[in-house]
Image (cartoon, grey):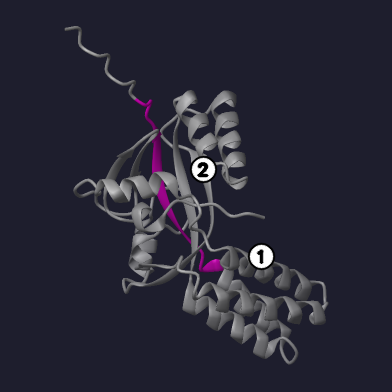
């Protein structure tokens, strides 16, 4: 499946950007000055910054846990090996971003609980963006029409048609949140390596390691506000 996502360097920066068709604000840090025009333009144009290999590894991890549950350790071993290779490729795909866990969310909702903030690590580490989707802004009352518009925008994003996705939101006048799912790159690699070590001798420990990898997913939320493009000013009569 083709993965799509906003340019992470712009999305996760502490800034508010207004770009053609979109106004974007992050919800993972305190807003500061507006981003430079070049950054704003890149954020508007690039919806391809998710790690394809990271997404593949995440899928393999889930399938490996299911295979262990089903007692198919050979299949689980192959899936774990595939996840390990995908993570190795993801290390050099230039999609990882540096953030502390405290700056990310434990769930897809915007609110970060005090419990999470107290228990999360405040040391910046590399996070691998593995998935992303548009959801209706939490402050908006959902309706079948609005839900349908967001679903249509997501279909266009997954098909790689970012311009059409933007048009759907703009024409509908909908404020949406773009939710990025990410995993700690090095810790996930360690969890998968541990699963590989124990898959034959102790499948239960292997499954635990894979579960730890799944539970490490954190989220970043970016608001995408539909902003109608202004028509060019009419020429002044002489």
Q: Is 65 or 74 nearer to us in this picture?
A: 74
The structure residue drawn at horizontal position 65% and vertical position 83%, both measured from the top left corner, is 195
Give me the C-alpha separation between circle 2 and circle 1.
20 Å
Image: magenta residue range? 215-229
Report helix, strand or loop for mark 2.
strand
Identify the residue position indicated by label 2 in the image.
134
On screen, residue 219 versus residue 236, left or right, reads: right
Is 2 a magenta residue?
no
Q: Is 15 or 190 nearer to us in this picture?
A: 15
The structure residue drawn at horizontal position 82% and vertical position 72%, both measured from the top left corner, is 70
Report helix, strand or loop for mark 1.
helix
Residue 235: percent from left, percent from top: 24, 14
Residue 161: percent from left, percent from top: 57, 41
Badge 2 crowding class, 10 Å Cα cut-off, few under 14, some 14 to 19, many 20 or more, is: many
Question: Which is the main secondary structure of the residues drawn in magenta?
Answer: strand
Compared to residue 174, the image places residue 81 above or below, namely below
The quadrant in which residue 60 appears is bottom right
């Amino acid at each position: 499946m083709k993965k799509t996502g906003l340019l992470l360097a712009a999305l996760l920066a502490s800034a508010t950007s207004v770009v053609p068709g979109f106004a974007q604000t992050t919800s993972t840090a305190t807003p500061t000055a507006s981003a430079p025009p070049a950054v704003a333009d890149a954020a508007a144009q690039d919806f391809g910054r998710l790690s394809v290999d990271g997404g593949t590894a995440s899928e393999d991890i889930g399938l490996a846990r299911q295979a262990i549950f089903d007692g198919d350790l050979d299949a689980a071993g192959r899936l774990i090996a595939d996840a390990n290779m995908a993570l190795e490729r993801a290390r050099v795909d230039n999609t990882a971003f540096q953030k502390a866990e405290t700056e990310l969310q434990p769930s897809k909702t915007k609110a970060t609980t005090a419990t999470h903030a107290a228990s999360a690590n405040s040391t910046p580490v590399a996070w691998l963006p593995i998935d992303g989707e548009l959801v209706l802004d939490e402050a908006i009352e959902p309706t079948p029409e609005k839900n349908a518009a967001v679903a249509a925008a997501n279909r266009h994003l997954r098909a790689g048609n970012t311009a059409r996705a933007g048009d759907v939101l703009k024409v509908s006048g909908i404020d949406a949140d773009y939710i990025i799912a990410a995993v700690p790159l090095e810790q996930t690699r360690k969890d998968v390596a541990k699963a590989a070590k124990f898959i034959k001798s102790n499948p239960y420990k292997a499954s635990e390691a894979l579960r730890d990898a799944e539970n490490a997913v954190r989220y970043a939320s970016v608001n995408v506000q539909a902003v109608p493009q202004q028509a060019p000013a009419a020429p002044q009569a002489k």
